[in-house]
């Protein structure tokens, strides 16, 4: 049996209830629930955005789901990677499969759940008649700035 590759981000996935100096993701700045995108999907996708205490960057993850059974990865992904991926699409529509490159491995649900989070954060919207195509939101820059300002708000509070 092949041993899974372990990296720092994946070793910290389930420590949200144990905030400590050993958990660089203990500073969760935003969390929420967004509806799943599938036609027959029920329930929500739960996400978290945290500031990593080691590199001070924002990260997000799929923290869970409600209303259904399905696997997903809980590892933390740099928010800047997600934003760059969205911005690389310009004005053209994209499928949820675009998000596959953010996940080293894992469930096929990752891409759809990530797409739901991106829409829920107002970074993308539905493209035309297909619920499975996405385009950059009209309020993308405004919503991106609001996310990035989470760090500034935290730094001012200190």
Image (cartoon, helix red, strand yellow):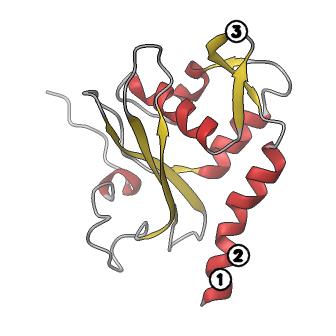
Q: Position of residue 80 (x, y in %)?
A: 67, 50
Tell me which residue sits at (33%, 59%) in the image: 12
**CA gap, disc 1 to disc 2?**
5 Å
| Residue at the disc numbered 1 | 155
Badge nearest the viewer, 2 or 3: 3
Instruction: Mark 1 and mark 2 in contact? Answer it, CB < 8 Å.
Output: yes
From what the image shows, is residue 119 above or below residue 12?
Answer: above
Image label count: 3
Q: Residue furthest top?
A: 129
**Residue 137 left/right relative to 43:** right
Residue at the (78%, 26%) spot, across then down: 89
First reached walking from the N terminus: tag 1 or tag 3: 3
Q: What residue is pinned by disc 3?
A: 129
Going from the N terminus, do you reach mark 2 or mark 3 first? 3
Q: Which mark is residue 50?
A: none
Relative side of 52 to 138, left or right: left
- Return the residue at label 2: 152
Q: Classify mark 2: residues with Cα within 10 Å, few (<14), some (14-19) or many (20+).
A: few
**Residue 38 or 100: which is nearer the viewer?**
38
Callout 3: helix, strand or loop? loop
Q: Secondary structure at mark 1?
A: helix
């Amino acid at each position: 049996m092949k041993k899974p590759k372990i990296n720092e981000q994946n070793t910290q996935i389930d420590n949200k209830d144990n905030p400590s100096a050993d958990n660089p993701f203990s500073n969760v700045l935003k969390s929420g629930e967004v509806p799943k995108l599938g036609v027959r999907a029920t329930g929500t996708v739960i996400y978290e955005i945290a500031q990593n205490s080691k590199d001070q960057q924002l990260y997000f993850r799929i923290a869970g789901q409600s209303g259904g059974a399905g696997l997903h990865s809980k590892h933390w992904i740099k928010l800047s990677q997600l934003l760059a991926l969205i911005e690389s699409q310009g004005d053209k529509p994209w499928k949820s499969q675009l998000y596959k490159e953010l996940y080293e491995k894992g469930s096929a649900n990752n891409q759809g759940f990530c797409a739901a989070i991106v829409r829920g954060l107002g970074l993308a919207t539905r493209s035309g008649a297909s619920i499975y195509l996405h385009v950059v939101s009209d309020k993308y820059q405004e919503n991106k700035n609001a996310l990035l300002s989470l760090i500034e708000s935290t730094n001012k509070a200190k």
